[in-house]
Amino acid sequence: MDRTGRLELAGDVDHPLKLASVTKVLTALGVLVAVEEEVLSLDEPAGPPGSTVRLLLCHASGLPFDGSTPIAEPGTRRIYGNAAYERLGDLLAERTGIAWTDYVREAVCQPLGMDATTLQGSPAAGARSTVRDLLRLGAELLEPRVILSPETLAEATSVQLPDLDGVLPGFGRQRPNPWGLGVEIKGTKSPHWTPTQASPATFGHFGQSGSFLWVDPDAGVACASLSDQPFGDWAREAWPALGDAVLAAARRGRSAHHDAG
């Protein structure tokens, strides 16, 4: 979909499938809503000693993929993992007095009309959703109108600690490995899972279930896909090609609209 609201769909877009790590985007948005509501703040202590909410969100808290024992000093390495988001889910429940599932549902999913999205289990990987619902989320990330202020979205999609290196699962070590608050930022990463023609500002997330959502703010395009095939070599090949086709179609659509006008 693009900023004009033009939507192109393929397959059964209303069939719910596992989001796996794309769940982290929903959890992060719940945290950001809580920040706007002054329930918590980005730079308050959270996680291991020396870490903060911000560092948990951008995978720089020092926590490993799973587990509670830090493997690095906070702010020194980009260590992607689930542990940080488990902490964030606990923090949301502690501050709001309700389960992370209920808070994210009420703060993010319901306002966006993501009625087919279900939240359970892990705040790092426990959600299920549909392509149609993910595109509702993509529309908000293109033009924040419902759950976030433009200022908060700008902060979330800005690179946090830009010099940090790290491993992007499935694509190897990236130097640097830029992340925002809950979303990965393309930057100059290569290889990568987003379109080869996407701008460096492109952000999003993919999951080991074969799911992804990316947003190219410069092109004004959001793209989402779900699969019943786990992430693997097929995705490394197909996703960038699909994304390039989506961007090319968006450019043709804008050109046709301009010519018609």
Image (spheres, helix red, strand yellow):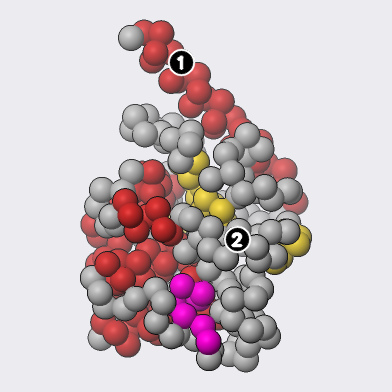
Q: Label for residue 255? A: 1
Q: Quadrant of the N terminus?
A: top left
Q: Which residue is mark 2?
A: 162
Report the magenta residues as a range: 50-56
Indicate whether residue 53 is drawn in magenta: yes
Secondary element at image label 2: loop
Q: Residue at x 43, y 59 (%)?
A: 156
Disc number for residue 178: none
Near mark 2 (Cα within 10 A), the count class, few <14, some 14-19 or many ≥20, is some
Instruction: Please rate how many residues cluster around mark 1, counting C-alpha atoms within 10 Å: few if below 14, some from 14 to 19, many from 20.
Output: few
Q: Name the amino acid type tagged 2.
A: Pro
Residue lying at the far top of the rendered structure: 260
Residue 19 horizontal/vertical position (percent): 50, 61
Among the 4 quarters of the image, the one containing residue 33: bottom left
Q: Nearer the viewer, residue 226 or 200?
A: 200
79, 83: nearer the viewer: 79
First in sequence: mark 2 vs mark 1:
2
Let me know if residue 151 is in the magenta part: no
Q: Residue 64 falls in which quadrant of the image?
A: bottom right
Specify whether 249 is left or right of 189. Answer: left
